[in-house]
């Protein structure tokens, strides 16, 4: 019943835990984009809306760099998932 | 095949407003009233943004309808929209998914199956805010809600989220939603607040205190309890550095409601390459803007919570200013009218920001406002 901090799910879309994020920050993956590449955080349906800030705070806690000075990562379209079939049709005929 | 400017089926609009909340509606109305053709897209099923679930009366100033309930303000804006329906095309359930820098095209999805691209002359980004979350064990259990979701359930759909609630956060949203839950017959077990004082207006705090709801200052939620759903919460006192110090208190609740703040939604502004800056007083990264709410991108304006977390009354005025800004840049109407309106709206904003809370906002705005872009 009682939960452990390490098991807290930070990125719900990709089910990545606080423990995993801390482990990779410890290994030197100290930017959001690097964590995204190794863990897929922020790559699910919400595109990081839920987890980004919490991850930046974890990076800040480890590196002692204020959150204000940590780059929040690259933002690319689409901001939410779009079905490939819809894209393949090319939009308006 | 990329034929710039000649993409098959590419839609056109003079002004694209992204987001139909208080800021986006106001921007659309203002631009339309000055003769612009506007396309307004909103990802929700009804226009009005957060206003439609706000059953409390607004503060602020008379110009921004102090004393009127939020959902009524939304109705008033929609009545005004009715007058400009030949100039404002509305797409509901429509999300702007991307801004493409190379050609200035915006991609949109209606529902999940209809996709279109649109090339606007000017864009107002009024994308609003998203709720902050806190990491704590078991925060994934059903029964942990954001305050916005609770308000939607209760005030839009008429569904009580549960029986007994722990509210996390004693800012205005936490206090107001607590009171509204009680009005709906839901019990509030307590409100926890990490700071050593209530963040929201005193009048809202007094309302819940009079009903006997305890407010635990300098406390935080330590974990949610429960196997498959929330069955309780553990809260604990914290010190000045937010480290847990006191004894743990277990509270039996079936709902944990998070009201720990909002942060601007600005993915599209990042995609567009707008100059962004982190401003704590505005609750996150925001676009730098000039006094017309124009960002560093010459075709993009910003308004409302997307430009920095503030009240809906300020969002409406910012929307109006952005609306005048785009009309002015499109050469609509005469410039003396623009100047007159701008002067009026800036006065109203200054009024709204005159109070104690406004000081913090003004400090934040100093960090992200330029007099005019060197265009």
Image (cartoon, grey):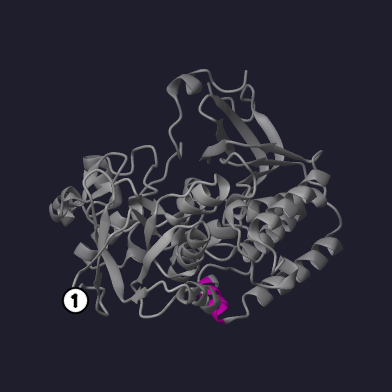
Label 1 sits on residue: B245
Residue nearest the observer in this picture, B68 or A59:
B68
Tell me where the magenta segment starts and ends, as one range: B356-364
Please state the horizontal and vertical placement of residue B286, each as a whole percent of the image: 49, 60
Q: Is residue B258 left or right of residue A32?
A: right
Q: Write down the quadrant of residue A70 in the picture.
A: bottom left
The secondary structure that most of the magenta stretch takes on is helix
Res. B123 in view:
yes
**Residue in the image at 65% along x and 55% along y:** B71
In this picture, residue A73 sits left or right of residue A15? right
Label 1: element kind: loop
Question: Looking at the image, can residue B374 be seen?
Answer: no
Q: Per the image, is B362 magenta? A: yes
**Position above or below: A2 against B211:** above
Q: Is residue B8 left or right of residue B247?
A: right
Give x and y (percent) for residue B186: 44, 57
């Amino acid at each position: 019943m009682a939960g452990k901090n390490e098991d807290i799910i930070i990125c719900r879309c990709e089910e990545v835990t606080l423990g995993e994020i801390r482990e990779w920050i410890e290994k030197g993956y100290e930017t959001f984009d690097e964590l995204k590449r190794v863990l897929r955080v922020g790559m699910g349906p919400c595109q990081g809306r839920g987890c980004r800030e919490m991850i930046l705070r974890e990076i800040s806690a480890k590196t002692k760099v204020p959150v204000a000075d940590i780059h929040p990562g690259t933002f690319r379209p689409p901001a939410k998932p779009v079905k490939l079939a819809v894209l393949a049709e090319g939009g308006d005929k | 095949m990329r034929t710039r400017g000649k993409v098959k089926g590419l839609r056109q609009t003079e002004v694209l407003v992204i987001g139909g909340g208080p800021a986006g509606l106001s921007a659309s109305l203002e631009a339309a009233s000055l003769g612009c053709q506007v396309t307004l897209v909103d990802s929700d099923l009804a226009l009005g943004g957060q206003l439609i679930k706000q059953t409390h009366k607004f503060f602020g100033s008379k110009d921004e309808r102090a004393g009127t309930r939020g959902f009524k303000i939304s109705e008033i804006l929609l009545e005004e929209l009715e007058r400009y329906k030949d100039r404002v095309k509305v797409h509901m359930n429509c999300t702007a998914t991307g801004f493409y820098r190379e050609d200035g095209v915006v991609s949109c999805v209606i529902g999940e199956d209809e996709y279109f691209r649109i090339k606007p002359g000017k864009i107002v980004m009024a994308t609003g805010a998203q709720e902050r979350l806190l990491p704590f064990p078991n925060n994934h259990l059903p029964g942990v809600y954001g305050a916005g979701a609770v308000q939607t359930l209760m005030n839009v759909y008429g569904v009580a989220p549960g029986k007994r609630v722990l509210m996390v956060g004693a800012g205005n949203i936490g206090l107001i939603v607590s009171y509204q839950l009680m009005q709906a017959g839901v019990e509030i077990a307590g409100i926890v607040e990490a700071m050593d004082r209530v963040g929201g207006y005193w009048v809202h705090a007094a309302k819940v205190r009079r009903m006997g709801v305890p407010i635990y200052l300098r406390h935080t939620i330590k974990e949610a309890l429960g196997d498959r759903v929330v069955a309780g919460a553990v809260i604990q006192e914290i010190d000045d550095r937010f480290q847990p110090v006191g004894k743990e208190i277990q509270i039996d609740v079936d709902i944990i409601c998070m009201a720990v703040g909002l942060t601007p939604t600005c993915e599209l502004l990042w995609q567009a390459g707008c100059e962004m800056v982190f401003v704590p007083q505005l609750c996150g990264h925001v676009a730098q803007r000039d006094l017309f709410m124009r960002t560093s991108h010459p075709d993009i304006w910003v308004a409302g919570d997307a430009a920095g977390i503030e009240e809906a009354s300020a969002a409406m005025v910012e929307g109006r200013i952005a609306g005048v800004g785009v009309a002015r840049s499109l050469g609509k109407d005469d410039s003396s009218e623009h100047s007159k309106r701008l002067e009026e709206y800036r006065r109203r904003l200054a009024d709204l920001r005159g109070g104690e809370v406004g000081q913090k906002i003004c400090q934040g705005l100093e960090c992200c406002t330029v007099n005019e872009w060197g265009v």
